[in-house]
């Protein structure tokens, strides 16, 4: 049996839909206790360091702990998009399974500020008995994590292969320090006479007085994101600073038959790289952008081709089980 403990992030819920999973897989949500606990931060630190709470915890609901405790020693456990170190270390002592893994859906640089913090994070997870999977090449090489592919689940009910695009380029996501690059891409697109839709959510990186088209405080529901993908010819991917790995935008472009504009220079070494389908910002000629975007593609063929790819969630889980069993 494979037990997947996913984050409560809406994309984790979307990807791990029951209809995509085979028998022998149980999915539940990783959640902390909703009860207010005095000095919870200090208690979490103490429990993660095994200074207190060796056989009990008030930081998680009893039902959650009991469910983890019932997992068999020969079962597999995967924490999907759960990255909090203290949570993972605390919960490990309640899980009888020997094979316990974590899939990080963000580069460590996005949640550990210093190089020392990132190295400590990797060491403590390893000491707790976790095998760590990542899509980020630098994290895999530097910290000994297992490199795995990105993962996706297509939904043709919201992105029809015969839909006629009425937007040229589309970006959605949090700022994460990417606003300047996005502004440069918008300027390049407008100079080429292309229509550009950007939905950039403000975060701690966004200058407080910055006012720009597309900036918002509201996340875009994923169903609406998919509708915009269906309306667009080309998706925009901008990596976070220090990231070395493809984002979900690449998967969406592949699965829905869209072009991709990315600032990731390493994408040229990926097996799916095709200069007819992927434009590398900072490398390819801006004068060719309009011709690149307007070149037709066979979206229906692409969607059928990628349906059985290793990046699809069901196949990805199969590959994970094989890799974790080695």
Image (cartoon, helix red, strand yellow):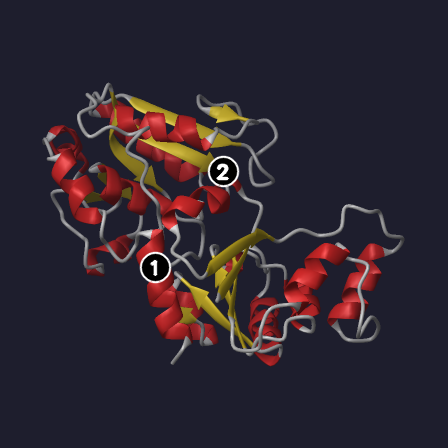
Q: Is residue 243 above or below residue 255?
A: below
Residue count near mark 2 (Cα–Cα under 10 Å), binned few <14, some 14–19, many ≥20: many
The residue positioned 34% from the left and 26% from the top of the image is: 228
Where is residue 270 shown, x and y percent of the image? 22, 59
| Residue identified by numbered label 1 | 316
Q: Secondary structure beneath disc 2?
A: loop
Where is residue 179 shown, x and y percent of the image? 45, 36
Left or right: residue 87 compared with residue 303: right
Instruction: Inspect this view and state whether residue 115 appears.
Output: yes
Q: Is residue 141 above or below residue 180?
A: below
The residue positioned 30% from the left and 46% from the top of the image is: 251
Q: CA distance from mark 2 to mark 1?
A: 28 Å
| Residue identified by numbered label 2 | 175
Q: Secondary structure beneath disc 1?
A: helix
The one nearer the camera, 99 or 122, is: 99
Could you say which quadrant of the image residue 196 lies in?
A: top left
The one nearer the camera, 207 or 305, is: 305
The residue positioned 37% from the left and 43% from the top of the image is: 238
Where is residue 114 shown, x and y percent of the image? 59, 64
């Amino acid at each position: 049996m494979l037990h997947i403990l996913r984050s409560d992030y809406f994309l984790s819920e979307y990807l791990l839909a029951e209809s995509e999973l085979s028998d022998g897989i149980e999915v539940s949500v990783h959640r902390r206790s909703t009860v207010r606990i005095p000095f919870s931060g200090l208690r979490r630190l103490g429990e993660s360091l095994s200074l207190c709470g060796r056989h009990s915890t008030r930081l998680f609901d009893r039902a959650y702990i009991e469910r983890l405790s019932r997992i068999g020693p020969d079962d597999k456990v995967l924490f999907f998009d759960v990255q909090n170190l203290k949570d993972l270390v605390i919960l490990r002592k309640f899980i009888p399974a020997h094979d316990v893994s974590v899939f990080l859906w963000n580069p460590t640089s996005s949640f550990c500020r210093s190089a020392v913090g990132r190295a400590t994070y990797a060491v403590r997870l390893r000491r707790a008995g976790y095998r760590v999977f990542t899509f980020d090449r630098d994290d895999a090489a530097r910290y000994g994590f297992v490199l795995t592919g990105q993962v996706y689940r297509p939904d043709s009910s919201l992105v029809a292969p015969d839909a006629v695009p009425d937007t040229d380029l589309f970006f959605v996501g949090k700022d994460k320090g990417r606003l300047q690059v996005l502004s440069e891409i918008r300027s390049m697109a407008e100079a080429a006479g292309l229509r550009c839709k950007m939905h950039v959510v403000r975060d701690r990186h966004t200058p407080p007085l910055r006012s720009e088209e597309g900036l918002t405080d509201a996340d875009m529901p994923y169903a609406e994101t998919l509708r915009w993908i269906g309306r667009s010819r080309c998706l925009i991917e901008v990596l976070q600073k220090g990231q070395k790995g493809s984002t979900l935008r690449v998967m969406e472009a592949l699965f829905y038959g869209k072009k991709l504009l990315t600032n990731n220079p390493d994408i040229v070494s990926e097996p799916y790289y095709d200069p007819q389908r992927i434009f590398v910002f900072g490398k390819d000629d801006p004068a060719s952008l309009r011709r690149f975007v307007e070149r037709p593609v066979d979206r229906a063929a692409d969607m059928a081709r990628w349906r059985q790819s290793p990046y699809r969630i069901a196949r990805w889980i199969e590959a994970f089980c094989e890799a974790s069993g080695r």
